[in-house]
Image (spheres, rainbow, N blue to C red):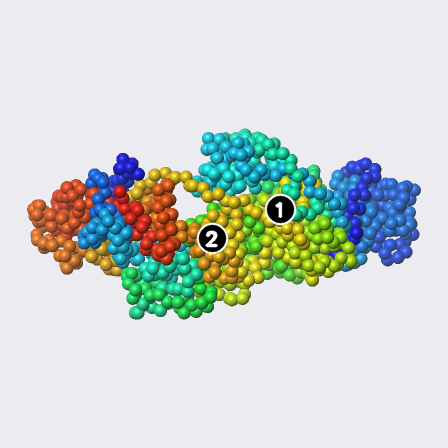
Amino acid sequence: MNFEQLDKHRTAAAVKLRAALNTSIAVGAILLGFAGYAHADARTQAKRMHDRIAGVPPDAATLNAMAALIPGDPIAAAAIALQAPSFYNVTLKNFVTPWTNRDQTVFAPLNDYTATVIGMIRDDVPFNTVLSADLLYVGGAGRPAYSPANNDLYEQLESSGADLSNPAVLVSTAQSTASGLPAAATAGVMSTRAAAQSFFVAGTNRAMFRFTLINHMCKDMEQVADTSRPPDRIRQDVSRSPGGDSRIFLNNCIGCHSGMDPMAQAFAYYSYDETAGRLVYTPGAVQPKYTINSDNFKPGFVTPDDHWDNYWRKGPNQLLGWSPTGGSGTGAKSLGQELAGSDQFARCQVEKVFKAVCFRAPGNGTDRTQVTNITTAFKSGGYKMKQVFAAAAAYCMGD
Amino acid sequence: MKTAIKNLGAAVLLATLAACGGGAPTKLNPTTTPPTVLDYTGPAPSTVDIQAFKINLWENIKASNRCGSCHNAGGQTPRFARNDDVNAAYADANGVVNLTQPDQSRMVLKVAGGHNCWLSSNSACGDILTTWIRNWAGSVATGGKTIQLVAPVDQSVGSAKSFPTDSTLFASTIYPILHDANKGNCARCHSSGAATPQSPFFASNDVNEAYAAARAKINLDNPAISRLVVRLRDESHNCWTSSCANDATTMLNSVTAFANGIPLQVVDPALVISKALTLYDGTVAAGGNRHDTNLVALYEFKTGTGSSVFDTSGVEPALNLSMSGDATWVGGWGINIKAGGKVQGTTTASKKLADKIKATGEYTFEIWAAPANVTQEDAFLMSYSGGTTARNVTLAQRAYQYEAFGRSSTTNANGIPGLLTKDTDRDAQASLQHVVLTFDPINGRRLYVNGNPTGDVDPRTGGSLADWDDAFAFVLGNETSNNRQWQGVIKLAAVHNRALTTVQIQQNFAAGVGERYFLLFNVSNLVNLPQSYIMFEGAQYDSYSYLFTNPTFISLDPAVVPGSIAVKGMRIGINGAEAHVGQAYATLNANIGSAYTASSGQVLANIGTIIGLEKGPTADMFFLTFEQIGSHLHASTDPTPVTQTPTDNPLLPDVGVRTFDQLNQSMANITGIPTTTAAVATTFQTLKQQLPAVPSIDAFLASHQTGIAQLAIKYCAALVDDVAKRTAFFPGLNTGGGSASAYFASQPNRDLVINPLLQKVVGTSLANQPQTADVQGELNSLITKLIVTPGSNIATVTKAACAATLGSGALTVQ
């Protein structure tokens, strides 16, 4: 973006702000004009970097410290902003919250899914374990105990303005210990209460797969649909002739279900008990939701267990870059490892951070090269998300 | 050449007999009135079986407008319709009927083949004759079922066109329309680089990727049914001009040009393939063991042409129905009712329903139907009624529910209150379902879906049907008054004058619906065993696909004992090439051996799949391919996907606005008022969703600014009202220093407010923040206005200046 274009956008924004102002003169709010845009100096870059990472403007001392580092080591400058409590309480919370509910709204309460991701990022836990780890972040001393049957702890943390950057406030524990789920059945954020409440509730458990794909692979079903995969694992509940027209199945339904159903089988023992408000896990017993509407297509697949297979390792979706090992397994944990082991998982995390920090998706060749570079460093550097935030913020701090 | 498969559900004889048609040209006799049965003066039936023959078959066929016209006492042999001696007729009839398999009777095959059918549909005559013979046979015809498998005539897989490996031809014919925005409209979505990418990516920037995705959408043998053409022509899917027909023609021409550029090729010689056959080369497996003892009317929709739907119950008078509006035949036996369509009988012919049902006081209305959607309400699937206010019985769909209205002595004349299935059960689905409504005087109405009682209890107990009106008409897909449209596919409808039991309903559900065949794919040369086949149960699933289920290895030579034969990666081929979609057996990994029995073979997989219809059931030639069968191997490979570079996005602003939590935390940080402070916390919770949710500056609205201003005022009020925090923020400011007008008359006093705001909110030496002089000017101007406002004081003016700065773009924009 050149300066003329930038000015044009800023002018457009200012016009909008001025329009907004007309409605608020009565309360004395005024629009303050911007200074003429000159070549961004280190202070300006530092402020933007802090704004984007911490969500709040820096105080004078922080700004000075960051500005001093910018010319030689912008990543070190970003590291200062990453220490701000609001990076965790505001930026990360709002970054993660939409992943935890079906409406993808940011206006949802803090929950165990969000808190666990925040904790993992804070403590530099390798992020490729986010879908498989036996890990949960709960309240520290003086906080309510974690309950697998309600969200009270996290709502208390949020309403009390708890500093989530403080390791004494948000502490790591084993999910199996906190929730009572067998360790082998834990699958990182997928087996948290919040994820279960949103994606294991009612339905057929395909929601967990779809939303995990959206949130952690940056792909919705339309983008991975592949009608050429074998449909042998598509369950009985999927009508092969919706409304009497099998073309709909052969051209649409099969594209998603042929790949999704064999992988969503990993969740066959999971459900969410709305009455008790908690995750249900029934090892060895397939949830009844897997066999509902069995008369829709009697010769369809009947789920016998939680064995999953990744049919997308062949066909166009092999471009997602699956790891050399894997491809099948039992249960959600190994499926989480399969997904998080892909190139696309790593790239997706980087793209999400890029968008959060740069306010736009990677949009041209330079952006994409940068994303590739950050992704490579992310994978080789132990999947530390803070590094990604720092690198993306440095890239988008302005010229 | 034959072997017997026990318990496969249908009685079938040699399928080859079905070809025994011929005889005199069909003569259309429109009369369908029941034959007279009171003129018989000959000897009485001498046995119970002859009596059964007399009642069930002979009295129906001896009339002069049916078989009795020729096969009478002095006419053609066999004289099974002679009117002078029922015992003699019985003796002749035995030569032309098969009581074990009534539908394979010579009499049935002859008439169904076109020999003097008295209706316009030969198959309807055949079905009616079958019913009469089955009624005569009684339990004999419903006993153990045996399928006689017949080896089909071996056919080799014919030549066909197959897709070239490189995309050159595609690039010069179809691709320009798919990809060029000036010619077509596909690239807007069907490209992985599109703003809203929608698979398949046949309009990709990369022609190879586009070609790989487009293959499944192209039919080389019949370009007109290519998905690329059908979507435009029949479904008006994102046409790029005002005429979808013209766009479809453009697409068709390009696909035709592509197809014409490909020479006919023999099937890939590298493939390991079976012999080939069409659906109709299979052994018939139709006519399952239904419970039809108390039939009053039956519709199997076998005719497939014309506008008459024949009642093949054999119960006179036939209640034939007329199709009107948008009601069309579908493949594999059925009708499709769309908006404006219905199928209705006359009130005169419908009278038999009232007559027969009132006689028993019970009824069952049974239907196999696939609702077009689960949103239609007040949609009458099946009705015997006279409009929206008067009915005998109606079966309706209400979104995910089924609903039954049935008049009895305990309801009103409109069958109300009705019986509605529970909403949460979602009994109605947009897939083929077997739905049954029963009524008996004790239990009232009951609904069954797919053989299972829905569990919903009739709000009324049973009652008498004596008040049924016999002047109503029987109708499918609507009310007689045309204002209760139901849309979907109906594959069978039946009316019984008894309430079927759960067991009987489950029997009818298990019998299934539609035509089915056993398809035997010869693999003898692949496994080196005589008469060895992979057998599928095949059927036309609907107008657009075939159903294949239960692949079974079997040899018709009972002496064959397979050792150990590996079968892996089986695919279904159609017209010379493997089907692109639906290869459910591609993952098959089975071993034929210990589980094999001579009588039933060995089932290889217990799942089914559907394969897209191409040319139609008479022409589509199927075969099987294998990655491994026995010692024959062929490695199947997928095309290698190509990574392509996404297109660049439009330039976007690289500035944004702070979102709700960011604003809240920023104001807290700047003012030193914690977010948990009651006054601001309450305001924030109220305003939260009014504040910006996304940083996109394009999405910033006036309402956002209003919310920001309100929040800023709360923070500034809390700040100024807190002495310690105020003193820290505005050092030297004395809110008790007299009137606002006097205090702020002095610029130094004004600077006590303005400078801290400049320093802490706007910041200093920041190129992209407002100019200091501009801020000072605006704030001075504001203070000047406020100090002359009645009631203002130093604190309120300070709060206003603070809020004006804190709620401004200096903080909001980042």
- In this rendering, would B323 be left or right of B251? right
Q: Residues within 10 Å of mark 1 (few under 14, many from 20)?
A: many
- Mark 1 — on which chain does it sit? B
Question: Which quarter of the image is occupied by the N terminus of chain A?
Answer: top left
In the picture of the structure, the residue carrying the numbered disc 2 is A322
Name the residue beneath numbered marker 1: B611
The residue carrying pointer 2 sits among few (fewer than 14), some (14 to 19) or many (20 or more) residues within 10 Å by Cα, namely: many
- Compute the Cα span from label 2 to label 1: 30 Å
Q: Amino acid at mark 1?
A: Ile
The numbered disc on residue B223 is none
Camera-nearest residue between B151 and B168: B168
- On the image, the x and y values in percent for residue B206 come to 47, 38
Is B214 left or right of B462, judged from the image as shown?
A: left
In the image, what residue occupies the spot 80% across and 55% down?
B100
How many numbered badges does the structure rendering display? 2
Answer with the quarter of the image where residue A360 lies. Answer: top left
Instruction: From the viewer's side, name the closer residue of B443 and B278.
Output: B278
Which marked residue is nearer to the observer: mark 2 or mark 1? 2
Q: Is residue B522 visible?
A: yes
Q: Position of residue A14 (x, y in %)?
A: 26, 40
Query: Residue B798 placed where, x, y %?
Result: 15, 50
Q: Is residue A147 left or right of residue B713?
A: right
Give SS at disc 1.
strand
Q: Secondary structure at mark 2?
A: loop
Residue B474 visible (yes or no): no
- Are the two marked residues, 2 and 1, in contact with CB atoms closer than 8 angstroms? no
Query: Is B615 rendered above or below residue B147?
Result: above
